[in-house]
Amino acid sequence: MPTEFLTLAELCEKLESTSKRLLMRDLVADFLKKLHTEEVEPATTMILGRAFPKWDQRTLEASWATLSDVIKRLTNVDWKDFREAFSSTGDVGTATKIIFEKTGKIRKQVMLFEKPLTILEVRRRLEAIAEAAGYGSRERKERLLETLFGAATPLEAKYLVKILIGEMRTGFFEGMMELAVSQAFQIPLDVVQRASMFAGDIAEVAAVAKVKGKEGVLNLRFQLFRPIRLMMAQMAVDVSEALQEHEGKSAFEYKLDGARIQIHKLGDKVKVYSRRLTDVTESLPEVVQLIREQVKANEAILEGEVIAVGEDGSPMLFQHLMRRFRRVHEIEEMTKQIPIQLYLFDLLFLDGQSLINNTYLQRRRKLEEISGNLSLTKQVITTDLKEAEVFLEEAISKGHEGLMAKKLDSPYTPGVRGKRWFKIKKTLEPLDLVIVAAEWGYGRRHEWLSDYYLAAREPETGELLMVGKTFKGLTDEEIIHMTKRLRELAVKEEHGRVVVIPKIVVEVAYNEIQKSPKYKCGMALRFARITRIRDDKSPEEADTIQKVKEIYEKQFEKKARLTNL
Protein backbone atom coordinates (compact mmCIF):
# COMPACT_ATOMS: atom_id res chain seq x y z
CA MET A 1 0.00 0.00 0.00
CA PRO A 2 1.26 3.48 -0.81
CA THR A 3 2.23 5.53 2.24
CA GLU A 4 -0.29 8.20 3.11
CA PHE A 5 0.88 11.79 3.30
CA LEU A 6 -0.89 11.96 6.67
CA THR A 7 1.77 9.68 8.18
CA LEU A 8 4.46 12.12 7.05
CA ALA A 9 2.48 15.02 8.56
CA GLU A 10 2.12 13.10 11.83
CA LEU A 11 5.88 12.47 11.86
CA CYS A 12 6.58 16.17 11.35
CA GLU A 13 4.15 16.98 14.18
CA LYS A 14 6.14 14.72 16.50
CA LEU A 15 9.40 16.35 15.41
CA GLU A 16 7.95 19.78 16.10
CA SER A 17 6.91 18.77 19.61
CA THR A 18 10.34 17.62 20.79
CA SER A 19 13.84 19.06 21.00
CA LYS A 20 15.52 15.72 21.80
CA ARG A 21 17.91 15.15 18.92
CA LEU A 22 18.26 11.39 19.40
CA LEU A 23 14.49 10.94 19.52
CA MET A 24 14.11 12.99 16.33
CA ARG A 25 16.75 10.89 14.60
CA ASP A 26 15.08 7.64 15.69
CA LEU A 27 11.62 8.78 14.59
CA VAL A 28 12.80 9.71 11.10
CA ALA A 29 15.01 6.61 10.75
CA ASP A 30 12.09 4.32 11.59
CA PHE A 31 9.87 6.20 9.13
CA LEU A 32 12.40 5.95 6.28
CA LYS A 33 12.84 2.20 6.79
CA LYS A 34 9.10 1.59 6.28
CA LEU A 35 8.79 3.55 3.03
CA HIS A 36 8.56 2.02 -0.44
CA THR A 37 11.62 2.59 -2.58
CA GLU A 38 10.07 5.27 -4.79
CA GLU A 39 8.79 7.17 -1.73
CA VAL A 40 12.14 7.70 0.01
CA GLU A 41 13.41 10.71 -1.97
CA PRO A 42 10.10 12.65 -1.99
CA ALA A 43 9.53 11.96 1.72
CA THR A 44 13.06 12.95 2.71
CA THR A 45 12.78 16.11 0.66
CA MET A 46 9.40 17.06 2.17
CA ILE A 47 10.49 16.40 5.77
CA LEU A 48 13.21 19.00 5.16
CA GLY A 49 10.59 21.47 3.94
CA ARG A 50 11.28 21.31 0.21
CA ALA A 51 8.99 20.43 -2.66
CA PHE A 52 11.79 19.04 -4.86
CA PRO A 53 15.39 17.82 -4.45
CA LYS A 54 18.00 20.56 -4.06
CA TRP A 55 19.47 19.89 -7.49
CA ASP A 56 16.05 20.12 -9.18
CA GLN A 57 15.69 23.58 -10.73
CA ARG A 58 11.89 23.49 -10.87
CA THR A 59 10.13 26.05 -8.68
CA LEU A 60 6.51 26.23 -7.60
CA GLU A 61 6.16 29.97 -8.29
CA ALA A 62 3.13 30.00 -6.00
CA SER A 63 3.29 33.08 -3.80
CA TRP A 64 1.77 33.39 -0.34
CA ALA A 65 -0.76 35.80 -1.86
CA THR A 66 -1.94 33.03 -4.21
CA LEU A 67 -1.90 30.40 -1.47
CA SER A 68 -3.84 32.56 0.99
CA ASP A 69 -6.50 33.26 -1.67
CA VAL A 70 -6.94 29.51 -2.12
CA ILE A 71 -7.25 28.94 1.64
CA LYS A 72 -9.82 31.74 1.93
CA ARG A 73 -11.97 30.27 -0.84
CA LEU A 74 -11.81 26.71 0.48
CA THR A 75 -12.61 27.57 4.09
CA ASN A 76 -14.79 30.63 3.47
CA VAL A 77 -13.21 31.99 6.64
CA ASP A 78 -13.14 35.58 7.82
CA TRP A 79 -9.44 36.36 7.35
CA LYS A 80 -9.48 38.02 10.76
CA ASP A 81 -9.74 34.48 12.21
CA PHE A 82 -6.59 33.49 10.34
CA ARG A 83 -4.72 36.54 11.66
CA GLU A 84 -5.81 35.71 15.19
CA ALA A 85 -4.65 32.12 14.77
CA PHE A 86 -1.33 33.32 13.43
CA SER A 87 -0.95 35.80 16.32
CA SER A 88 -1.44 33.03 18.86
CA THR A 89 0.93 30.57 17.19
CA GLY A 90 3.39 32.62 15.11
CA ASP A 91 3.27 29.90 12.47
CA VAL A 92 1.49 30.05 9.10
CA GLY A 93 1.06 26.29 8.86
CA THR A 94 -0.43 25.96 12.33
CA ALA A 95 -2.77 28.89 11.65
CA THR A 96 -3.96 27.10 8.49
CA LYS A 97 -4.64 23.93 10.48
CA ILE A 98 -6.67 25.89 13.04
CA ILE A 99 -8.95 27.51 10.48
CA PHE A 100 -9.41 24.24 8.58
CA GLU A 101 -10.55 22.66 11.85
CA LYS A 102 -12.68 25.64 12.76
CA THR A 103 -14.57 25.55 9.49
CA GLY A 104 -15.11 21.81 9.60
CA LYS A 105 -12.59 21.15 6.82
CA ILE A 106 -12.06 17.50 7.80
CA ARG A 107 -12.03 14.87 5.10
CA LYS A 108 -14.52 12.05 5.61
CA GLN A 109 -12.46 9.04 4.62
CA VAL A 110 -15.41 6.69 4.95
CA MET A 111 -16.55 7.99 1.57
CA LEU A 112 -15.09 5.51 -0.88
CA PHE A 113 -14.63 8.02 -3.70
CA GLU A 114 -12.40 10.21 -1.54
CA LYS A 115 -8.98 8.61 -1.62
CA PRO A 116 -6.46 9.75 0.97
CA LEU A 117 -3.44 11.73 -0.22
CA THR A 118 -0.24 9.71 -0.55
CA ILE A 119 3.34 10.93 -0.51
CA LEU A 120 3.70 10.19 -4.22
CA GLU A 121 0.38 11.86 -5.06
CA VAL A 122 1.50 15.03 -3.27
CA ARG A 123 4.76 14.99 -5.25
CA ARG A 124 2.86 14.56 -8.53
CA ARG A 125 0.59 17.48 -7.71
CA LEU A 126 3.55 19.68 -6.73
CA GLU A 127 5.17 18.82 -10.07
CA ALA A 128 2.00 19.85 -11.89
CA ILE A 129 1.98 23.19 -10.04
CA ALA A 130 5.64 23.80 -10.95
CA GLU A 131 5.03 22.94 -14.60
CA ALA A 132 2.07 25.33 -14.99
CA ALA A 133 3.65 28.18 -16.96
CA GLY A 134 2.80 30.81 -19.52
CA TYR A 135 -0.50 32.58 -20.12
CA GLY A 136 -3.12 31.75 -17.47
CA SER A 137 -0.58 29.91 -15.29
CA ARG A 138 -1.69 31.63 -12.09
CA GLU A 139 -5.27 30.42 -12.56
CA ARG A 140 -4.05 26.88 -13.31
CA LYS A 141 -1.85 26.91 -10.23
CA GLU A 142 -4.78 28.10 -8.11
CA ARG A 143 -6.99 25.28 -9.40
CA LEU A 144 -4.27 22.71 -8.69
CA LEU A 145 -3.76 24.11 -5.20
CA GLU A 146 -7.48 24.03 -4.52
CA THR A 147 -7.63 20.38 -5.57
CA LEU A 148 -4.64 19.56 -3.36
CA PHE A 149 -5.94 21.32 -0.25
CA GLY A 150 -9.46 20.10 -0.95
CA ALA A 151 -8.22 16.55 -0.42
CA ALA A 152 -6.25 17.36 2.75
CA THR A 153 -7.06 16.96 6.43
CA PRO A 154 -6.28 19.95 8.68
CA LEU A 155 -2.97 18.39 9.78
CA GLU A 156 -2.01 17.64 6.17
CA ALA A 157 -2.93 21.21 5.22
CA LYS A 158 -0.55 22.50 7.89
CA TYR A 159 2.42 20.68 6.40
CA LEU A 160 1.44 21.28 2.80
CA VAL A 161 1.63 25.01 3.55
CA LYS A 162 5.03 24.57 5.19
CA ILE A 163 6.38 22.67 2.17
CA LEU A 164 4.90 25.15 -0.30
CA ILE A 165 6.47 28.18 1.40
CA GLY A 166 9.65 26.36 2.48
CA GLU A 167 9.16 27.00 6.20
CA MET A 168 9.14 23.62 7.97
CA ARG A 169 10.56 24.85 11.31
CA THR A 170 10.49 21.48 13.08
CA GLY A 171 14.10 21.82 14.24
CA PHE A 172 15.06 18.86 12.03
CA PHE A 173 17.72 19.94 9.56
CA GLU A 174 19.97 18.39 6.95
CA GLY A 175 22.70 17.31 9.37
CA MET A 176 20.14 15.41 11.44
CA MET A 177 18.71 13.82 8.30
CA GLU A 178 22.22 12.48 7.59
CA LEU A 179 22.14 10.88 11.07
CA ALA A 180 18.70 9.39 10.37
CA VAL A 181 19.74 7.97 6.98
CA SER A 182 22.87 6.48 8.55
CA GLN A 183 20.79 4.74 11.22
CA ALA A 184 17.92 3.69 8.95
CA PHE A 185 20.10 1.88 6.43
CA GLN A 186 23.02 0.91 8.71
CA ILE A 187 25.63 2.92 6.83
CA PRO A 188 28.48 4.72 8.66
CA LEU A 189 27.76 8.41 9.15
CA ASP A 190 31.01 9.54 7.49
CA VAL A 191 30.04 7.56 4.35
CA VAL A 192 26.60 9.21 4.28
CA GLN A 193 28.07 12.70 4.81
CA ARG A 194 30.64 12.22 2.07
CA ALA A 195 27.99 10.97 -0.35
CA SER A 196 25.79 13.92 0.54
CA MET A 197 28.66 16.24 -0.43
CA PHE A 198 29.01 14.54 -3.81
CA ALA A 199 25.28 14.27 -4.55
CA GLY A 200 24.53 17.74 -3.20
CA ASP A 201 21.36 16.40 -1.61
CA ILE A 202 20.78 14.00 1.29
CA ALA A 203 17.43 12.96 -0.23
CA GLU A 204 19.20 11.35 -3.17
CA VAL A 205 21.61 9.59 -0.80
CA ALA A 206 18.65 8.22 1.16
CA ALA A 207 17.06 6.88 -2.03
CA VAL A 208 20.30 5.16 -3.09
CA ALA A 209 20.81 3.77 0.43
CA LYS A 210 17.34 2.20 0.37
CA VAL A 211 18.01 0.35 -2.89
CA LYS A 212 21.76 -0.30 -2.99
CA GLY A 213 22.91 0.02 0.62
CA LYS A 214 26.42 1.03 1.62
CA GLU A 215 28.01 -0.04 -1.67
CA GLY A 216 25.68 2.15 -3.69
CA VAL A 217 26.26 5.14 -1.41
CA LEU A 218 30.05 4.67 -1.65
CA ASN A 219 29.77 4.80 -5.43
CA LEU A 220 28.06 8.20 -5.52
CA ARG A 221 30.17 10.78 -7.32
CA PHE A 222 29.86 14.33 -8.59
CA GLN A 223 27.30 14.70 -11.35
CA LEU A 224 27.77 17.56 -13.75
CA PHE A 225 24.86 20.01 -13.77
CA ARG A 226 23.87 19.04 -10.25
CA PRO A 227 25.34 21.89 -8.18
CA ILE A 228 26.98 21.07 -4.85
CA ARG A 229 27.00 23.07 -1.65
CA LEU A 230 29.69 25.71 -1.29
CA MET A 231 32.55 25.74 1.21
CA MET A 232 32.11 28.63 3.64
CA ALA A 233 34.50 30.93 5.51
CA GLN A 234 34.61 32.29 9.03
CA MET A 235 35.34 35.91 9.88
CA ALA A 236 38.79 36.89 11.15
CA VAL A 237 39.41 40.09 13.06
CA ASP A 238 42.56 40.84 11.06
CA VAL A 239 45.28 39.22 8.96
CA SER A 240 47.30 38.27 12.03
CA GLU A 241 44.50 36.00 13.26
CA ALA A 242 44.40 34.24 9.89
CA LEU A 243 48.18 33.75 9.86
CA GLN A 244 48.12 32.40 13.39
CA GLU A 245 45.31 29.92 12.62
CA HIS A 246 47.06 28.86 9.39
CA GLU A 247 50.33 28.07 11.17
CA GLY A 248 52.11 31.18 9.97
CA LYS A 249 51.47 30.96 6.21
CA SER A 250 48.35 31.64 4.16
CA ALA A 251 47.09 32.38 0.67
CA PHE A 252 45.51 35.85 0.76
CA GLU A 253 43.16 36.81 -2.08
CA TYR A 254 41.02 39.81 -2.87
CA LYS A 255 37.54 39.45 -1.41
CA LEU A 256 35.44 40.84 -4.22
CA ASP A 257 32.15 42.69 -3.74
CA GLY A 258 30.35 40.38 -6.13
CA ALA A 259 28.29 37.22 -6.40
CA ARG A 260 29.77 33.79 -5.95
CA ILE A 261 29.01 31.30 -8.72
CA GLN A 262 29.59 27.64 -9.47
CA ILE A 263 30.22 26.74 -13.10
CA HIS A 264 29.70 23.29 -14.66
CA LYS A 265 31.17 22.43 -18.06
CA LEU A 266 30.77 19.37 -20.27
CA GLY A 267 32.15 19.97 -23.74
CA ASP A 268 30.38 23.08 -25.04
CA LYS A 269 27.54 22.77 -22.54
CA VAL A 270 27.97 25.25 -19.69
CA LYS A 271 25.68 25.97 -16.74
CA VAL A 272 26.13 28.67 -14.11
CA TYR A 273 24.66 28.41 -10.60
CA SER A 274 24.28 31.04 -7.89
CA ARG A 275 25.36 30.55 -4.28
CA ARG A 276 21.76 29.39 -3.66
CA LEU A 277 22.43 26.72 -6.33
CA THR A 278 19.86 28.28 -8.65
CA ASP A 279 20.47 28.10 -12.39
CA VAL A 280 21.40 31.64 -13.54
CA THR A 281 22.92 30.63 -16.88
CA GLU A 282 20.57 32.74 -19.01
CA SER A 283 21.36 35.87 -17.01
CA LEU A 284 25.13 35.54 -17.54
CA PRO A 285 25.74 34.76 -21.24
CA GLU A 286 29.22 36.37 -21.11
CA VAL A 287 30.33 33.86 -18.49
CA VAL A 288 29.11 30.94 -20.60
CA GLN A 289 31.00 32.25 -23.62
CA LEU A 290 34.21 32.85 -21.68
CA ILE A 291 34.19 29.35 -20.18
CA ARG A 292 33.58 27.75 -23.59
CA GLU A 293 36.41 29.72 -25.16
CA GLN A 294 39.03 29.62 -22.43
CA VAL A 295 38.72 26.59 -20.15
CA LYS A 296 40.99 23.80 -21.38
CA ALA A 297 38.97 20.85 -20.09
CA ASN A 298 36.12 18.71 -21.34
CA GLU A 299 34.60 18.32 -17.87
CA ALA A 300 34.99 20.78 -15.05
CA ILE A 301 33.30 22.26 -11.98
CA LEU A 302 34.77 25.66 -11.20
CA GLU A 303 34.10 28.32 -8.61
CA GLY A 304 34.38 32.03 -9.11
CA GLU A 305 32.97 35.45 -8.50
CA VAL A 306 31.34 37.91 -10.86
CA ILE A 307 31.33 41.62 -10.18
CA ALA A 308 29.57 44.45 -11.96
CA VAL A 309 32.09 46.96 -13.36
CA GLY A 310 31.93 50.54 -14.55
CA GLU A 311 33.42 51.96 -17.74
CA ASP A 312 36.83 52.28 -16.08
CA GLY A 313 36.72 48.69 -14.85
CA SER A 314 36.19 49.61 -11.18
CA PRO A 315 33.64 47.61 -9.15
CA MET A 316 30.02 48.76 -9.10
CA LEU A 317 27.60 48.33 -6.21
CA PHE A 318 26.43 44.80 -5.42
CA GLN A 319 22.79 45.81 -5.98
CA HIS A 320 23.52 46.51 -9.66
CA LEU A 321 24.89 43.00 -10.03
CA MET A 322 21.75 41.50 -8.46
CA ARG A 323 19.70 43.15 -11.20
CA ARG A 324 21.59 40.93 -13.65
CA PHE A 325 20.77 37.80 -11.65
CA ARG A 326 17.07 38.65 -11.50
CA ARG A 327 16.78 39.43 -15.21
CA VAL A 328 15.40 36.75 -17.52
CA HIS A 329 14.29 39.01 -20.39
CA GLU A 330 16.15 41.57 -22.52
CA ILE A 331 19.46 40.09 -21.40
CA GLU A 332 21.42 41.62 -24.28
CA GLU A 333 20.40 45.15 -23.28
CA MET A 334 21.24 44.43 -19.63
CA THR A 335 24.71 43.17 -20.53
CA LYS A 336 25.38 46.61 -22.02
CA GLN A 337 23.95 48.49 -19.04
CA ILE A 338 25.69 46.38 -16.40
CA PRO A 339 28.84 44.72 -17.74
CA ILE A 340 30.43 42.08 -15.54
CA GLN A 341 33.90 40.72 -14.86
CA LEU A 342 34.53 37.06 -14.03
CA TYR A 343 37.22 35.94 -11.58
CA LEU A 344 37.89 32.25 -10.87
CA PHE A 345 39.34 30.97 -7.60
CA ASP A 346 38.75 27.21 -7.25
CA LEU A 347 38.48 23.96 -9.20
CA LEU A 348 36.47 21.07 -7.71
CA PHE A 349 36.24 18.56 -10.55
CA LEU A 350 38.32 18.00 -13.65
CA ASP A 351 37.82 15.45 -16.45
CA GLY A 352 36.26 12.73 -14.33
CA GLN A 353 38.29 13.35 -11.17
CA SER A 354 37.12 14.95 -7.94
CA LEU A 355 39.65 17.44 -6.57
CA ILE A 356 37.96 18.28 -3.26
CA ASN A 357 40.47 16.21 -1.27
CA ASN A 358 43.41 17.92 -2.97
CA THR A 359 44.98 20.80 -1.10
CA TYR A 360 43.90 24.33 -1.93
CA LEU A 361 47.35 25.04 -3.40
CA GLN A 362 47.07 22.00 -5.70
CA ARG A 363 43.58 23.00 -6.83
CA ARG A 364 44.68 26.57 -7.51
CA ARG A 365 47.65 25.41 -9.61
CA LYS A 366 45.39 23.09 -11.65
CA LEU A 367 43.03 26.01 -12.13
CA GLU A 368 45.88 28.15 -13.46
CA GLU A 369 46.76 25.40 -15.95
CA ILE A 370 43.29 25.15 -17.50
CA SER A 371 41.90 28.69 -17.22
CA GLY A 372 43.44 30.18 -20.37
CA ASN A 373 43.22 33.98 -20.33
CA LEU A 374 40.54 34.12 -17.63
CA SER A 375 41.26 36.25 -14.58
CA LEU A 376 41.90 34.56 -11.27
CA THR A 377 41.40 36.39 -7.98
CA LYS A 378 44.61 38.28 -7.18
CA GLN A 379 46.62 36.32 -4.64
CA VAL A 380 49.62 36.67 -2.33
CA ILE A 381 51.03 33.67 -0.46
CA THR A 382 53.02 34.93 2.48
CA THR A 383 54.28 34.44 6.02
CA ASP A 384 54.87 38.16 6.44
CA LEU A 385 52.27 40.06 8.48
CA LYS A 386 53.23 43.43 7.02
CA GLU A 387 52.96 42.17 3.45
CA ALA A 388 49.49 40.79 4.17
CA GLU A 389 48.36 44.08 5.76
CA VAL A 390 49.59 46.07 2.75
CA PHE A 391 47.73 43.64 0.48
CA LEU A 392 44.55 44.24 2.51
CA GLU A 393 44.89 48.01 2.12
CA GLU A 394 45.47 47.56 -1.60
CA ALA A 395 42.28 45.46 -1.99
CA ILE A 396 40.17 48.04 -0.15
CA SER A 397 41.68 50.96 -2.07
CA LYS A 398 40.60 49.27 -5.31
CA GLY A 399 36.98 49.06 -4.19
CA HIS A 400 36.93 45.47 -2.94
CA GLU A 401 35.57 44.26 0.41
CA GLY A 402 38.81 42.97 1.91
CA LEU A 403 40.66 39.66 1.75
CA MET A 404 40.08 35.93 1.89
CA ALA A 405 42.71 33.87 3.68
CA LYS A 406 42.94 30.21 2.67
CA LYS A 407 45.01 27.53 4.37
CA LEU A 408 47.37 26.11 1.78
CA ASP A 409 46.74 22.45 2.62
CA SER A 410 42.97 22.76 3.07
CA PRO A 411 40.63 20.36 1.22
CA TYR A 412 37.33 21.63 -0.14
CA THR A 413 34.53 20.86 2.32
CA PRO A 414 31.09 21.49 0.72
CA GLY A 415 28.56 23.10 3.03
CA VAL A 416 31.04 23.44 5.90
CA ARG A 417 32.10 26.72 7.54
CA GLY A 418 35.45 26.57 9.29
CA LYS A 419 38.82 28.17 9.98
CA ARG A 420 40.47 26.82 6.85
CA TRP A 421 39.04 29.85 5.04
CA PHE A 422 38.71 33.31 6.60
CA LYS A 423 37.06 36.56 5.53
CA ILE A 424 38.91 39.70 6.57
CA LYS A 425 37.37 43.17 6.47
CA LYS A 426 38.37 46.44 8.11
CA THR A 427 34.91 47.21 9.47
CA LEU A 428 32.75 45.42 12.03
CA GLU A 429 31.53 42.16 10.57
CA PRO A 430 28.14 42.71 8.90
CA LEU A 431 25.30 40.30 9.60
CA ASP A 432 23.01 38.60 7.12
CA LEU A 433 19.56 38.85 8.72
CA VAL A 434 15.99 38.00 7.74
CA ILE A 435 13.20 40.56 7.48
CA VAL A 436 10.30 39.24 9.59
CA ALA A 437 8.08 42.35 9.66
CA ALA A 438 7.94 45.93 8.41
CA GLU A 439 6.18 49.19 9.22
CA TRP A 440 4.70 51.81 6.94
CA GLY A 441 6.81 54.96 6.73
CA TYR A 442 6.00 58.57 7.50
CA GLY A 443 5.92 61.72 5.37
CA ARG A 444 6.91 61.01 1.80
CA ARG A 445 7.44 57.33 2.75
CA HIS A 446 3.87 56.84 3.98
CA GLU A 447 3.00 54.55 1.06
CA TRP A 448 6.08 52.37 1.53
CA LEU A 449 7.06 49.64 3.95
CA SER A 450 10.32 51.24 4.96
CA ASP A 451 11.09 50.28 8.58
CA TYR A 452 12.29 46.68 8.79
CA TYR A 453 12.42 44.20 11.69
CA LEU A 454 15.56 42.08 11.50
CA ALA A 455 16.06 38.56 12.89
CA ALA A 456 18.81 35.95 13.27
CA ARG A 457 18.31 32.18 13.20
CA GLU A 458 18.25 29.85 16.18
CA PRO A 459 19.61 26.77 14.37
CA GLU A 460 18.41 24.23 16.93
CA THR A 461 14.75 25.22 16.73
CA GLY A 462 14.48 27.14 13.46
CA GLU A 463 13.08 30.12 15.38
CA LEU A 464 13.89 33.60 14.11
CA LEU A 465 14.88 35.96 16.94
CA MET A 466 14.66 39.69 16.41
CA VAL A 467 17.84 41.67 17.02
CA GLY A 468 16.75 45.13 15.85
CA LYS A 469 15.02 47.24 13.23
CA THR A 470 16.11 49.86 10.75
CA PHE A 471 14.80 52.30 8.17
CA LYS A 472 18.24 53.17 6.81
CA GLY A 473 20.29 52.03 3.85
CA LEU A 474 17.95 51.43 0.91
CA THR A 475 17.32 53.82 -1.96
CA ASP A 476 13.78 54.95 -2.81
CA GLU A 477 13.76 52.57 -5.77
CA GLU A 478 14.81 49.66 -3.55
CA ILE A 479 12.19 50.55 -0.91
CA ILE A 480 9.44 50.58 -3.54
CA HIS A 481 10.55 47.16 -4.82
CA MET A 482 10.88 45.87 -1.23
CA THR A 483 7.35 47.06 -0.43
CA LYS A 484 5.95 45.06 -3.34
CA ARG A 485 7.80 41.92 -2.27
CA LEU A 486 6.83 42.23 1.39
CA ARG A 487 3.16 42.78 0.58
CA GLU A 488 3.17 39.50 -1.35
CA LEU A 489 4.59 37.81 1.77
CA ALA A 490 2.29 39.55 4.28
CA VAL A 491 0.54 37.33 6.82
CA LYS A 492 -1.14 39.97 8.98
CA GLU A 493 -1.20 43.71 9.53
CA GLU A 494 -2.08 45.69 12.63
CA HIS A 495 -1.23 49.19 13.87
CA GLY A 496 0.86 49.90 10.79
CA ARG A 497 3.02 46.79 11.24
CA VAL A 498 3.02 44.05 8.60
CA VAL A 499 4.20 40.58 9.62
CA VAL A 500 5.67 38.62 6.69
CA ILE A 501 6.80 35.12 5.83
CA PRO A 502 10.58 35.30 6.42
CA LYS A 503 12.02 35.00 2.93
CA ILE A 504 14.15 38.11 2.32
CA VAL A 505 17.75 38.29 3.55
CA VAL A 506 19.61 41.59 3.92
CA GLU A 507 23.17 42.42 4.88
CA VAL A 508 23.19 44.74 7.88
CA ALA A 509 25.95 47.00 9.20
CA TYR A 510 25.86 48.40 12.74
CA ASN A 511 28.04 50.28 15.21
CA GLU A 512 27.93 47.72 17.98
CA ILE A 513 25.81 45.04 19.62
CA GLN A 514 24.41 45.92 23.01
CA LYS A 515 22.35 44.26 25.73
CA SER A 516 18.63 44.84 25.37
CA PRO A 517 15.65 43.61 27.39
CA LYS A 518 13.46 44.64 24.45
CA TYR A 519 14.17 41.46 22.50
CA LYS A 520 13.89 37.82 23.52
CA CYS A 521 17.53 37.16 22.63
CA GLY A 522 18.67 39.91 25.04
CA MET A 523 20.71 41.76 22.41
CA ALA A 524 20.13 44.53 19.89
CA LEU A 525 22.06 46.12 17.04
CA ARG A 526 22.96 49.77 17.57
CA PHE A 527 22.56 52.08 14.55
CA ALA A 528 21.66 49.23 12.20
CA ARG A 529 21.52 49.97 8.46
CA ILE A 530 20.97 47.77 5.44
CA THR A 531 23.99 47.68 3.15
CA ARG A 532 22.64 45.30 0.53
CA ILE A 533 19.75 43.00 -0.32
CA ARG A 534 21.07 39.44 -0.36
CA ASP A 535 18.92 37.81 -3.03
CA ASP A 536 21.79 35.36 -3.43
CA LYS A 537 21.14 33.97 0.06
CA SER A 538 18.24 31.94 1.44
CA PRO A 539 16.85 32.40 4.98
CA GLU A 540 18.58 29.13 5.93
CA GLU A 541 21.89 30.87 5.14
CA ALA A 542 21.17 33.85 7.37
CA ASP A 543 23.44 34.32 10.38
CA THR A 544 22.65 32.57 13.65
CA ILE A 545 21.92 34.08 17.03
CA GLN A 546 25.07 32.29 18.23
CA LYS A 547 27.11 34.35 15.78
CA VAL A 548 25.50 37.55 17.10
CA LYS A 549 26.49 36.46 20.62
CA GLU A 550 30.07 35.75 19.51
CA ILE A 551 30.40 39.22 17.99
CA TYR A 552 28.89 40.72 21.15
CA GLU A 553 31.50 38.95 23.30
CA LYS A 554 34.38 39.87 20.95
CA GLN A 555 33.62 43.54 21.54
CA PHE A 556 35.03 43.14 25.05
CA GLU A 557 38.42 42.00 23.82
CA LYS A 558 39.26 45.67 23.29
CA LYS A 559 36.55 47.36 25.37
CA ALA A 560 35.86 47.35 29.07
CA ARG A 561 32.78 45.53 30.32
CA LEU A 562 30.56 47.03 33.03
CA THR A 563 30.62 44.61 35.93
CA ASN A 564 28.16 46.35 38.23
CA LEU A 565 25.09 45.74 36.05
Image (tube, rainbow, N blue to C red):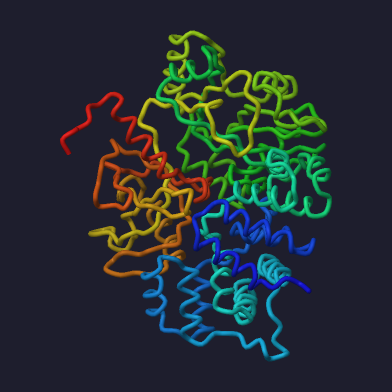
Is residue 106 rendered to the left or right of residue 296? left
Is residue 208 rendered to the left or right of residue 324? right
Residue 532 seen anywhere in this rendered image of the structure: no
Image quadrant where residue 48 sits: bottom right
Q: Residue furthest bottom?
A: 111
Q: Residue at x 73, y 39 (%)?
A: 191
Q: Total number of numbered labels?
A: 0
* Residue 121 picture location, percent across and down: 72, 72
Q: In this rendered view, identify the residue nearer to me: 265 or 24.
A: 24
Is residue 261 rendered to the left or right of residue 438? right
Q: Residue at x 24, y 50 (%)?
A: 517
Q: Considering only vertical position in the picture, is 285 above or below 98?
A: above
Q: Considering only vertical position in the picture, is 178 above or below 556?
A: below
* Residue 25 picture location, percent across and down: 61, 53
Image quadrant where residue 49 sits: bottom right
Q: Residue at x 35, y 52 (%)?
A: 466
- Name the quadrant of the C terminus: top left
- Name the quadrant of the N terminus: bottom right
Q: In this rendered view, identify the residue nearer to me: 299 or 108.
A: 108
* Residue 468 picture location, percent across and down: 31, 49
* Residue 320 picture location, percent across and down: 48, 42
Residue 262 seen anywhere in this rendered image of the structure: yes
Q: In this rendered view, identify the residue nearer to me: 367 or 238.
A: 238
